[in-house]
Image: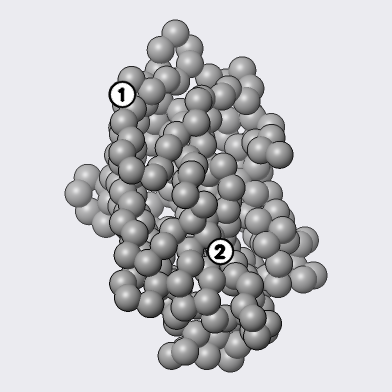
């Protein structure tokens, strides 16, 4: 991605296999480009391997999403792997706002995200994990979901989030885990504008939504924050994550709420 004549554009685009990228959209007059990734196969299957690479040149501005939820089906023989590598040049910006990940019965899914970011760049990275339908009606029938995100700056790790969900080994219903909640959302923000005031506003917003949720936000070692949300439905968790992202969009970039108009 690179800025051209006031708008960000893809200077090189390539795909092979199942994943595709839909044509770009511009949701407002900021010049930020929006792309959606689609899996025509309808879901991730046993042993599938996917890799996405994003390179943002100086000043590029990208909002990346998915066309629909990522569905991960049974993995009885081999785990499913999604790898994403991101390089953010000075003054570039990435908002990665995929729809929820749905983990079905006997899923073994690993997601590895590696981000190399410059101090002046901006990153907003979201994830929501939802338990898929089970014949027994039990919420945690997947075997393992592992989401590992590593952000480095000048070759040094500045944020690592390693979320591992193994219902059979951990007892996710119990104390210190989900404690009756079934869905989890995460938002990782790295941005030079992230200060104590921004973190306080995010915490206030999450507190206002805490009726059916449990949520928290903490500062990262470099300017930024990590947000985690527990809930009992995809909409309420997703809406809380989106609300935080929208608050920061307006505060730092003067943009309105994201309206992806997928349906």
Vertical placement of residue 19 versus 27, above or below? below
Name, please, the residue furthest toward the left: 155
Q: CA distance from mark 1 to mark 2?
A: 31 Å
Which of 118/177 is in front? 177
Q: Give the residue at mark 2.
A: 102
Q: The N terminus lies in which quarter of the figure?
A: top left
Q: Kindly tell me whether residue 2 is visible in this rendering.
A: yes
Q: The C terminus lies in which quarter of the figure?
A: top right
Percent position of residue 174, x then y: 58, 91
Which of 238/88 is in front? 238
Does residue 118 appear left or right of residue 28 in this picture?
left
Does residue 222 appear left or right of residue 248 in this picture?
left
Q: Give the residue at mark 1.
A: 12
Vertical placement of residue 106 versus 56, above or below? below
Vertical placement of residue 168 versus 30, above or below? below
Does residue 64 appear left or right of residue 30 in this picture?
left
Q: Residues within 10 Å of mark 2 (few under 14, many from 20)?
A: many
Does residue 134 appear left or right of residue 157 in this picture?
right
Q: Kindly tell me whether residue 198 is visible in this rendering.
A: no
Which is nearer the N-term, disc 1 or disc 2? 1
- Report helix, strand or loop for mark 2: strand
Q: What residue do we see at 44% from left, 8% from top?
A: 5
Percent position of residue 242, x then y: 65, 49
Q: Residues within 10 Å of mark 1 (few under 14, many from 20)?
A: few
Q: What residue do we see at 57% from left, 35% from top?
A: 252
Percent position of residue 197, x then y: 60, 49
């Amino acid at each position: 991605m690179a800025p051209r004549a006031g708008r960000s554009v893809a200077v090189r685009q390539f795909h092979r296999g199942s994943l595709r990228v839909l044509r770009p959209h511009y949701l407002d007059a900021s010049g930020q480009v929006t792309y959606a990734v689609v899996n025509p196969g309808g879901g991730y299957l046993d042993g599938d391997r996917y890799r996405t690479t994003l390179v943002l040149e100086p000043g590029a501005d990208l909002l990346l999403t998915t066309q629909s939820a990522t569905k991960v089906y049974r993995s009885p023989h081999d785990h499913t792997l999604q790898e994403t590598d991101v390089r953010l040049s000075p003054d570039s910006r990435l908002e990665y706002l995929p729809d929820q990940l749905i983990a079905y019965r006997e899923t073994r899914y690993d997601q590895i995200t590696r981000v190399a970011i410059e101090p002046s760049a901006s990153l907003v990275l979201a994830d929501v994990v939802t338990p898929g339908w089970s014949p027994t009606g039990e919420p945690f029938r997947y075997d393992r979901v592992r989401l590992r995100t590593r952000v480095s700056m000048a070759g040094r790790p500045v944020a690592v989030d390693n979320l591992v969900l193994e219902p059979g080994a951990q007892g996710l219903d119990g104390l210190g885990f989900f404690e009756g909640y079934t869905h989890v959302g995460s938002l990782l923000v790295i941005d030079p504008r992230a200060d104590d005031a921004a973190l306080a506003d995010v915490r206030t917003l999450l507190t206002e939504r805490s009726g059916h949720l449990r949520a928290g936000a903490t500062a990262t070692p470099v300017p930024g924050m990590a947000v985690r949300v527990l809930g009992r439905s995809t909409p309420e968790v997703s809406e809380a994550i989106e609300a935080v992202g929208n608050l920061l969009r307006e505060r730092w970039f003067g943009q309105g709420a994201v309206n992806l108009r997928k349906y």
